[in-house]
Each structure stands twice: as C-alpha cells, then as structure tokens.
Image (cartoon, coloured by chain):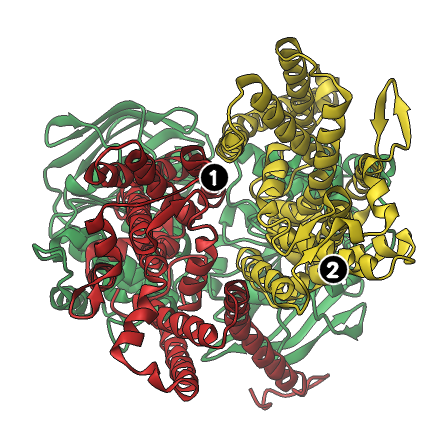
Chain colours: A red, B green, C yellow
Amino acid sequence: MARRSGWLRGWEGLLLGILILVVAFNVINARHYVGIQNLVNLFELHIEEIMVALTMTFLIINGEIDLTVGSMMGLAGCVMAALWEKGIPAPYGIAAALAVGILVGAFNGFMSTYMGLSSLIVTLAGLIGFRGLAFVLLEDRSVGNFPGWFDHLGQQPLVGPFPFAVLAFVVMLVVSIIILHYTGFGRYTYVIGNNKDVARYAGVNVRRVKMTLFVASGLVSAFAGLLLAARTGSMRGDTGTGTELAVITMVVFGGVSIFGGTGSMFGVLLSILITLNLRNGMGLLNISGDVQTGVLGLLLVVAVLVPTVGNALRDLFRRRQVSTHPRGAGEQKGGAS
Amino acid sequence: MPTGTSADPVLEMRHISKRFDTIQALDDVTLRLYPGEIHTLVGENGAGKSTLIKIMTGIYSPDEGEILLDGKPIRVHSSVDAQGYGIAAIYQEPMVFPDLNVAENVFITHGSRSIGVNWSRMVREAEAIMAKLDVSLDVRMQARGLTLAQQQTVEIAKAISLQVRVLIMDEPTASLSAHEVEQLFKLTRTLRDQGVSVLFISHRMEEIFEIADRVSVFRDGRWVSTRARSEVTAEGVIRDMVGSEIEEFFAKTRAARGDLLVSLRGLGRRGVFSGINVDVYRGEVLGFAGLVGSRRTDVGLALFGVAPADTGQIILDGKATRIQKPQDALRRGIAYMSEDRRGIGLSMPMSIATNITLPMLRNYVSRLGLVRVGAEDATAEQFRQRLSIRTPSVHEQVGRLSGGNQQKVMLSKWLNTRPRLLILDEPTRGIDVGAKAEVHHIMNELTSQGMAIIMVSSDMPEIMAMSDRILVMREGRQMAIFDRREATQEKVLAAAMGQHGGLKENA
Amino acid sequence: MATIRRYVRPEQLRVFSLVFLILAIFLFFGSQIQGYFSVRIFNRVTSDVAIVAVVAMGETLVLLTRNYDLTVGSIVGVTAFFVGKVVSAYHGLPPVAAFTLAIGTGALMGAVNGVVISYGRVPSLIATLGLLAVYRSILVGAPTDKIVVAHLLPPWVLNLAGASLFSIGGFYVTPLLVIALAVLVVFHLVTRYLRFGRRLYAIGSNPEAARTGGMPVDRTVFLAFVLSGALAGLGGIMFLVRYGDLTVGAAQGMELNVIAAAVVGGVGAFGGYGTMIGALLGAFMIDLLDLSLLRWLQISDFWVGAFLGALILLAVTVDSVIVTRLRDIWAKGELRAGTARESAAAGKEEDGGA
C-alpha cells in the first residue's frame, strides 16, 4: 500500500513541522546537540523501545495490539540472566531467550486468533503474567557480570560510532518499510486491519498473517530485552516495565489509527524522531523520567484530540451556514444550494 | 381498508428537496400520509426513499420544503424531536440491546423524566403493549436470543410505547422467512386499524399488492405517482419505477450452451439449506430466484468456501471436490461477488488497483516478495477500460466512487481471478439504471466467452430477462428449475412462495 | 425450570459460580492449611480486598460502556499522596473533609478523562493510557518531598486502619470493609434501579442503537468516568489509611489488578454485562487465591503476577467460550418456550376465531 491517503500526508507534514521545532529548540538550548555522538546517544538510550515500535506498528495497523512487549523484554532478559547465573554459557541463554519470545508470541497469537479472544485482554493478561514469570526467575535480585563480549556488543560502538543495536535498528527499519509498503504481506496487513472479511473472501489466510505478526512481536521484544541487558550490563525482574505506553504512544502519534487499516511507517519514523528528541531535550533540562513519560502521555492525547476537535469545529461552522438557509412555505426551487 | 383518505393528513412532506454534493437526492417531492392507512413507497435504490425517511426522522434537514404535522409546520432536528412528534422508523437491521430484556428494550430509549426504574411497572406496560399488538412475546426474555422478526416486534412495541402516529418501515421483510413476513403484515394491519399511519418501503411486488392501501412511486429523487391499490398494476408500477418498458433494459443475447461445468448433488449445510441438485453449464446464466430468506446467498457461500457445505457433493471436472475455504474455490476457478459492497466486498480506504488485485496478489509479486506495481496498474487500467469505470485514476480510493463504479471494481476483482464459474449475488442492487445495463452487457460478454454464471437476484424482471434457466429456492430448499422458454413471473413467484407448479429435478 | 429461566439471568449465574468457587477455595485450603481461618488473615484479606474492590466497582461502571479506564492506578496514587500531605500538614482537618477531598480530587481527574473521551472522541484506551502517565507525572513532578510519612499523619488515619467497628464471633469488621460494602450496596442500586445505570448497560450492549435512539450517550459515559475517578479517589484515601508510608510510586500498576478483578468478576469484554457484586467477588477471589497458594505451596511471593495473568486469561476464555454458549442456549430455551406459548396462543385463536 504505497499510496497513502491525503489525510495522512497532512499528518506527516504536521509531524515534520513538529520535529523541526523540537530539534530547533534543542539545538538552541545545547550547542553540542548537533554532533554525531549526541545523535548516537539520542538513539541509543531508547533503542530497544523504538525497535519494538516497528513490530507494534504492524500489529496496530492489522487491528490488533500487543501489551506484552515490556514484559517480554523483561522475561527474555531474565531467562538469559537466570541461565547465566546457573553457569550456562551466554549463547545458550540468548537462544533460550529468543525461543521464549517466539513461544510467547505464538501463544498471544493463538489466543487472539484461534480462540477468538480480544488481543487487548489477552495481552493485558500476558503483561501481568509474563512480568510475574520474570520475577519468578530472578525474584528481587539483580544479575549482571555478563561475559565481556556481550557487554561490549551492547555498549561499545561497532561500526564507526554506531553500536550494534543502532545498526540493527536501522536494518530493521528498512526491512519494515519495505515489507509494510512494498510487499504483498504488508498489503494483507492493511486489508485485514481495515476489514477482516474482505481479506478472508479474497482468499487471504488471515490467521497466518496474524500469527506471524504476533510471533514477530514476541521475537523482537525478546531481542530488545537482550539488547537492554547488554547495554545496561544488568538485569532485574522489573526491567522494561512501562514500555508499552511509550511504544503505543509513538505508533499512534505517528498517524496509525488504533482501529487499524491506516497509517504508515514513515509517520511512525517521524514520531520516533520527535519522541527521541523530546526526551533528549527534556533530559538536558533535567526533567525526570516519569515526568518525561507524562509529557509523552499528554502528547498522545493531544495528538488524537486535535483532528477530532478540528472536525467538530468545522462541522459546527458548516451547520451554522446551513441553518441560515431560507426555508418556508411556498419556497420556489431557486434557492442557493 | 383505508380509513383516512378523506380526513386530513397526519404528516405532509411538501416540496422537499435535498442535495448532496453533486447528487440531487430529492427534487420537489410532496407526500401526504393519512392516519389509519398503509402507504407503500416504491422505487429503485437511489430513488430517494431513504433520504426522505432520514429527513422525516430528523437525521437530515431538507434544503427546501417543509414538514407539516396536522397541518402545522414543524422542524425535526434529531431523532429525539421525531420521537416527540410521534414519528418512528424501523429498519431492516433492528437495533436492540442484546443484554437487556425485552421490556427494558422497549422503554430504555424514552427521554423520560424519572431517574429511577420501576421494573414491575415496566414489565406490566410492556406486556400490555404486546397484548395490544396481539403478539405473545415474553417480555422478560433477554433480547439476545430473539430472531430478527421478534426484534422487529420489539421495535414496533417501542414505537407504540412512544405513541407513534407515523411509523416508517424501511424494507423490513428483507431477512424474514415467509411465515415471519405474514406475522409482520398482520402486525402492520393491526397498527393501521388502530389509526397509525404506516409508511412501508418496499420494492417487492408481492408485498405491495398484499399490504398496501395506497402506492406511491419515486424515481430518481422525484415523485412519480400515488394511487389507491385498486388502481395499481404490476406493469404500471414497474413502468413508473423504471421510466420505460422493461424490455429495453435487459438485452439478453442467447449464447450457445456449452459443456457441463459443475454438478451439485444433494448439496446442503445443516440448519441453513439442503437438497440442491442442479447441473451448471458453460455459457449459461443460471438465475437463483426466491424471496429473501430463501438462503440463496448461502449456496453461493458454500460454493465459494466461506461457509462450506457439509452434505452432498460438488462435482467439478468429473470429480467430487471439497471446497473448504476461498482459496480452494479460487484455485478451482470459482469466484463469488457478494451483495455487500461495504461490508465484505471492498476495502474502502484502499485504491482501485489494490482492491482489484487482492485475491490474485500472488501473481503480482516478484520473487523477493515485492509488489510489482506496474503490472498491477496495467491490470487495473485494462479493467477500467473494459468495464468503463468512471474515475480519474486507478489509484483513487474506492470509497470515493459511486455505487455503480464500486460494483464494477468488485466485478473486476473477481473477473481478474479468471473464473470458470462466477457467482454474482445481487449484482445490480443499489446502482443506477445505466450502470445496471452495463453490468448486464458485461454478463452477456462473459457468457459468450464460455463462462458460467450463477446470478442470485431479488429483482424479478432481471431474473426473467437474464437467466437461461431459473432455480427457485424457498427457505433453504430447492423448489423448482424452470427453463427460460416456459418460465413466467407467476410460475416463479408461485414456486418461491411454496406453491407447486414447476419442474423439480434437473432441467 | 422455565420459571427459573425467567427470573435468573446468565450473569447472575456467573456470580453464583463465583460464590461457589470461593466457598470451594475456602473449604479446600481450610483443610490443608493450619490456622487458615484466623483473624489476622481475615483482616489482611479484607483490607486489601476492600481497596481493590472499591476501585474495581468504579472500573466496572466504565467497562460496562465498552470503555477502559487505565488511569485508576494513578488516581489512587495521586489522591493518596495528596490527601496524605494535606492531613499531615493540617492535623485538625476533620476526617469527613479529608474523604471529601479525596473523592473530589478523584472525580476531577475522572472528569478530565470524561471530557477527553466523551467529547474529545479519543478512544478510551489511548486516552487513559496517556492520561495515566500525565497524572503520575504531576505527582512525581510536584515540588514536594517525595514521601508521605506515617508518623506525621494525624492519629485518626492511623487508627482507622486497625479499628474495628464491631465484631462477629471474633472477626473484626474494619471501617475499610464497611466502606467497600457501602459502595457495593449503593452502586448495586445505581446499576439496577437508576436509569443512568441501565443506560451504561445499553451503551455497552449496542452503542449504535444507543446513539440513534437518542440516549444521552456522551453525558452518560462522561459520568461513568467521573464516578470511576471518584471511587478511585475513595480508594486512594483508603490506600493512605492502610499503608501510611507512601512514595510517589504508590499504587503504580494497580489498574491491572483492578481490571483483573472486574474481568474475573464477570464483566463482559465488550461491555453490556457485569455486576458490582461480581467485581467485589472477583477482587476477593483473586486475593484469597493468591494468599492461599502462597501459604499452601509455599511458593515465593513472586508467582503472584504470573498467576494473576493466568487467572485473567482463564476467566476471559471461560466467559468467551462457555458463558456465551450458555447464554445462547439460555436464550434459545426461552425462545422455544416463548414460541411454544406463541403457537399455543395462535392455536387457541384459530379455534376460537373465524
């Protein structure tokens, strides 16, 4: 679906404007803002979140949602950490963590697709449940001391100034754009989100598409969890809590409708850039993390509010025009239309 | 029997006009409704009936003209206003609250002053209304389990509770069984006898003649005629609806009947339909006739794998095949175009080209999985020309097209799957007369190229004119198969209503 | 049997099954764990449950309309903290005023929710997802020291937690429990006998019909959110009473427990059905089960989350698979009975008529 509706192009234009404003504001406040190192930092601090936002975009366009992403990041990291604690070499731990991601994704998909449950409630239960499992594994301990290469991969630059995570994100971003906008699978994603029945009648295997998306979400969340462990050098039961809010905010703010069927990866990319710059800017102003999240929450609400309020105002205006229409007995057909 | 033709009208719509962008939905329409009559309003889709109803119930306001209640002008700005004036409407899809019981359903939308709910009084009053309607429905029942017909009864009870004076019934019999239609008619007559003015919208000839006291015809947003039932004939009504004789519109070319394509033997789906036995040949149009509720669509859905059959056989290319999902059907060269454009036919926000290629997307995808947009556009252009789809470009959003053009896009979509058997479900419903003729012309082309077409249609003239053979269904059962030469509208209607008179086996 | 069908609704059946389950849990664990029926446990359970139940009942009002209120956790935290600070500074403030302040603050936040959702037409999931962060950030960002300290609170707050209004056979009935029961009674009446309450069900049951039928949908949903906020505010001051020492992270994540309680208590995934007593029983059952498993299996406290998640899933699956089917069978049974009556009546008519 390379064609985007006119409305969306308007939204993306707005986002671009906001991005420019935010960046300008930041640059004024901190002159070293425009430097490669700061740019990398910008991405690095939240790289795991924005990675998950990519798969979340697919899911929401498809008319579903995955609230387990934060818990999955925690669970996957804890799986690896717990195994590491027991002396199992990291590669096995990593493989196990990714496997868990796939399994959980499959579980979410199965419950939502084959059992006909609402993905909202299923992943809400998963949010609680998988976080609980993470705690079961690590209880209230914090596990660290990961192998050197692991920490190195997470914290040190790999190619030029870019760490592994940032490179991985760029690759994933490009792949996501291609899949969503230029492949048949991407098109199926849109159609199913717009109207499941139309897709079904056209012979699309709706279940397979949904399962694939849920599994992908689980896998990417697990991968992100591992990256988080590598970057911070430690893992706790509550790592990744609250990620869902940030991720959904970024996606919806990017112009993706929560009801599915519309939105684009480009909008989400702009939204990601705005979010990152905003957070960075707020951090430079010493605003605490919770308050930053609050600002993002406000942004989300306002973002969805504005078009509705705009429409309502426009309708009000139009209605006022109509009610001044001449009406009455014996009126001839000559009135203005 | 009409009681009020000499009395003053309850409601008068005078010189109503309404325009939407480029379409004049209503043009200087005047209609008078008297108490104690059943006034049938007839017209094709696009004739302006639903626009008029929406104006009467306050959803739209007229650009010009006025509404008079008991001779005095009124303004209806919302459904609450309409309620207050005693104007209520019942539609094909009744709006009940499944989780509430019947009594509550009747009273909950009242703009009542009281803060509290008196359950025992509510039940008592609901029962009283049911008695008044001479219907026995347990008002303590949850609305969820009600049949469509019973839900309509609840709607009518709701209207009575609001002291309705003008009750609009918009194609209420669409999804009812014959028995339920009878019940509804009985109810409607009871209402009429109690002085309610009923505006009954229908385009089904049988209904008009059975229930109407007076018949009005609209065409293209204009009032054409209003006559007492005794002065009305079927041909006259059709002539008024269409504007010219029937023959002109359905030009049917006789194609040579080709080989046997598919045979259905004892095909059925438990609880839905059963006993379908027919051979379908290439190059022919097999019309599926019947009153709504006859389950013709379900046979189509079974052939297409959306709601597969569980008994009987589908014999294709000499072998019995199982069709369990749409992909099975498509692979075997069977395509199904649904009657519901909005709901399941098209993806409105997506482009024409995207919609057309959707079922066959496999063929437009390169080895890497990327969509070959050029090939897609080429296909879309081909169909645009072939079917004369009026649009600035094939990238236009389908939702922006007119009904007729949307129908053509849907048709393109299924033609693109190169079917051997094309099932069309109400192919010309809701489109203007010109587009209708185009669709029929295309059908002729297709059959002359050897395609087999099953056409489900509730439009009797269309069935009569376009079909080579007519299969009549009633309440899920096959009643008769007529050959074109021996079929008359009477015979088909009789079979559709259960009276015998036609061949039952294969023709 | 037919009479039972006429007077008992499927969701009442759900509530009965919940009661039954709770009894079963009692009996089972009572036989397995020593000292199960002790005063201490009773008090602990009822105090915790009371808070969650009150907030869950408010949440149910919103869920009935097919909306979600994810802000309740933040509202509880904000009101608990805010009231805690106020009463710490003004020991002379009468308890009634403190309660009013809590409820009022909660209602105010609920009103903001309502405006954004009802009139701003923002989907409730998104709106409350964003607003929960906004409210929490107000708490975190406010210029105060980030804690409420128990020993700075006025004595009536501290006493209220442990006080017993009266005792039944050795088990004390705490004020918190009484508050929860009072809320239960009031809101049961609201949802059963007030037009406003019935409209909540209608809106969830068929939102389109509600609108075209001329119901004041926006106003009703707005009020539902105000009430949800108000009850969360009440929950907030109860939280303060129960815990005394608070940080700015107080009650973070509580919305999940609350929704879990409502879902287990039988509220429909798409609104339209659910009861106040279900919410309370749901809260009760979750806490009871959690506590019992803890003591019985001696599993670590950390299994709570996993278990809770599984429970929600189970409840929703059961609802969707079994209860829906049951409801259809129920309705069809009524249908058959109704049709039988219909045809009997018709038969009589034919005999007696022309």
User: Residue C51 is drawn in which quadrant?
Assistant: top right
Give coordinates of residue A72: x percent, y percent. Answer: 38, 44
Q: Chain of mark 2?
A: C
**Quadrant that contains the C terminus of chain A:** bottom right
Q: Answer whether residue B386 is visible to the viewer in this image.
A: yes
Establish if C349 lies above or below C74: above
Does mark 1 fall on the same chain as mark 2?
A: no
User: Residue B502 is drawn in which quadrant?
Assistant: top left
Which secondary structure, mark 2?
helix
Horizontal placement of A250 versus C312: left or right? left
Between circles 2 and 1, the one closer to the viewer is 1
Q: Nearer the viewer, residue C64 or A311?
A: C64
Give coordinates of residue A216: x percent, y percent. Answer: 28, 47
* The label number, if any, that marks residue C82 in the structure image: 2
Type of amino acid at the residue the image marks with label 2: Phe
Type of amino acid at the residue the image marks with label 1: Asp
**Quadrant that contains the N terminus of chain A:** bottom left
As drawn, the residue found furthest toward the top would be C31
Horizontal placement of B146 versus C193: left or right? left
**Residue at the image point whose x is 92% and y is 58% from the top:** C92
Q: Chain of mark 1?
A: A
Q: Which residue is mark 1?
A: A140
How many neighbours does mark 1 have within 10 angstroms: few (below 14), some (14-19), or many (20 or more)? few
Disc 2 and disc 1: Cα gap in Å? 29 Å
Horizontal placement of A70 versus C102: left or right? left
**Residue at the image point whose x is 14% and y is 36% from the top:** B261
Q: Nearer the viewer, residue C293 or C123?
A: C293
**Residue at the image point whose x is 32% and y is 70% from the top:** A41
Establish if C296 lies above or below C78: above
User: Residue B190 is drawn in which quadrant?
Assistant: top right
